[in-house]
Amino acid sequence: MHQYDLIVVGSGPAGRRAAIQAAKLDKKVLVVEQGRRVGGVSVHTGTIPSKTLRETALNLSGWRERGFYGRSYRVKQEISAEDLRRRLLITLDHEVDVLEHQFARNRVQHIRGKASFVSKDTMQIAKDDDEIVQVSAKSILLAVGTRPYRPTSIPFDGKTVLDSDELLEVHSIPRSIVVIGAGVIGIEYATIFSALDAAVTVIDPKPALLDFIDKEIVEDFTYQLRDRNMKLLLGQKAEKVEHLPGGKVCVSVDTGRKIIADMVLYAAGRVGATDTLNLPAAGLDADSRGRLRVNPETFETSVPGIYAAGDVVGFPSLASTSMEQGRIAARVAVGAIAKEPQKYFPYGIYAVPEISTCGLTEEEMKERGIPYECGIARFRETSRGHIMGLDSGLLKLIFSLKTRRLLGVHVVGEGATELVHIGQAVLNLKGTVEYFVENTFNYPTLAEAYKIAGLDAWNRMGEKPRDETSSETVNLTDNATPTTVETKITTEKKKASLK
């Protein structure tokens, strides 16, 4: 029996960050990974592969230059699946090499095998050579991630009817594809294939795309998709998928429509990979989708000493938030001080175009009864946007009228997942509209859109009121007691004259 301070099951974003954090606190850590190589779903079938595929598709297709050279412009006339896979393999090898080096440098032990509970503090690991190893620890962190949901009614064959994991192994790029499911994964892949000039149809029973995103951003995004002839069958359900002679696939919709395509991607949900863990032996149970419930501040499950982090605990299921969850869980698990995670984090959707958001949406502002004002900047208004040939994309800022604080930042367009971090910083540091009005941004850049959007809101809000002693009122939150900051302009002028 091998004894550890922390056993981490899974080496994805949550697992690896947790293991390294615990190791840096001089704890003995073991990582168990059942995949062929470390990295988990994020490295091998999820985050990194899909984003690499996206970047390769945009580069080879010449997508970013079509604003100047027309929709027919292509860097490589005939793009093959092998072209996409070549860059993917290089990227994955690099990611695995970096992770293995991090484990070695921090003296994190890792073993390949399938882990399952024997008791709440003991696990057995079934290795590939049929050897069974038992290990125990003071704390155990489950970071096993999720896998695609595969209903028995869908005739998956790995060639023309696939899930999102199998899509990375396709041997040819389809001329037409039906995507069942308009969630984040479905929309990302649908827009990538659209950029490769495939005819794309998206089917989803919900009446609108991405209903957790600000409605105005989704409307702009939807317009861009329809503008390039993507078919969005929203509020409609795919009832049947069947193979046709000649290799085609037919999808029957509950409205009576039948869509025939070269390929079908089923991307309607994922399930937690917890079915092989023997959870009852530890006193745990998962929900109907295999996910675990945790304390949102400590990520401890209902069983003391057992933690869970990452996609297996549900929303938001982002690599970035999973990393932070893993780090916090590891610190709590080994008895170190851990701060509560930041309230506002960026959400990135790597579609074409990108969407990224942080803070409250306009709909949430209305629900909470917070008086607000918005500022909008379109990328075509910036010189950088014109240089890049952008005719779409916008930045939206939402401010409280009472406190003038930034409460939401929403971006759709080129570089959205990078641009959002400026707004995230201002939001979490409780900055106001004056930050954007009074600060200088590099020119020409897309970040200049923050200045434009800030001024747009400021013009509607009016200048900040000041009393006769030049004091300014600042509320830290919409419900906080205001504090007064004396500016004393005359005193500052005297100081400046002395200098």
Image (tube, rainbow, N blue to C red):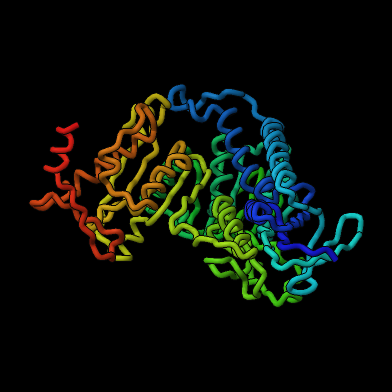
Is 410 left, or right, of 82 in this rendering? left
Q: How many marks?
A: 0
Looking at the picture, tell me which residue is in the foreground, 184 or 172.
Answer: 184
Which residue is at 70% across, 62% downward?
A: 273
Say if residue 11 shows up in the picture: yes
Residue lying furthest left in this view? 468
Name the residue: 15% across, 47% down: 488
In the rendered image, residue 75, in percent from the top left (x then y), is placed at: 57, 23
Where is the N terminus found, in terms of image quarters?
Answer: bottom right
Q: Is residue 328 above or below residue 118?
A: above
Residue 68 left/right relative to 265:
left
| Image x and y of residue 59, in percent | 57, 29
Task: Answer with left or right where residue 425 lies relative to residue 262.
Answer: left
Q: Residue at x 65, y 74 (%)?
A: 304
Quadrant of the image occupied by residue 305: bottom right
Left or right: 119 in relation to 392: right
- Residue 31 position within the rendered picture, expressed as x and y whole percent measured from the top left: 74, 56
Q: Residue furthest front?
A: 498
Q: Is residue 258 visible?
A: no
Give coordinates of residue 210: x percent, y percent: 47, 54
- Give the quadrant of the C terminus: top left
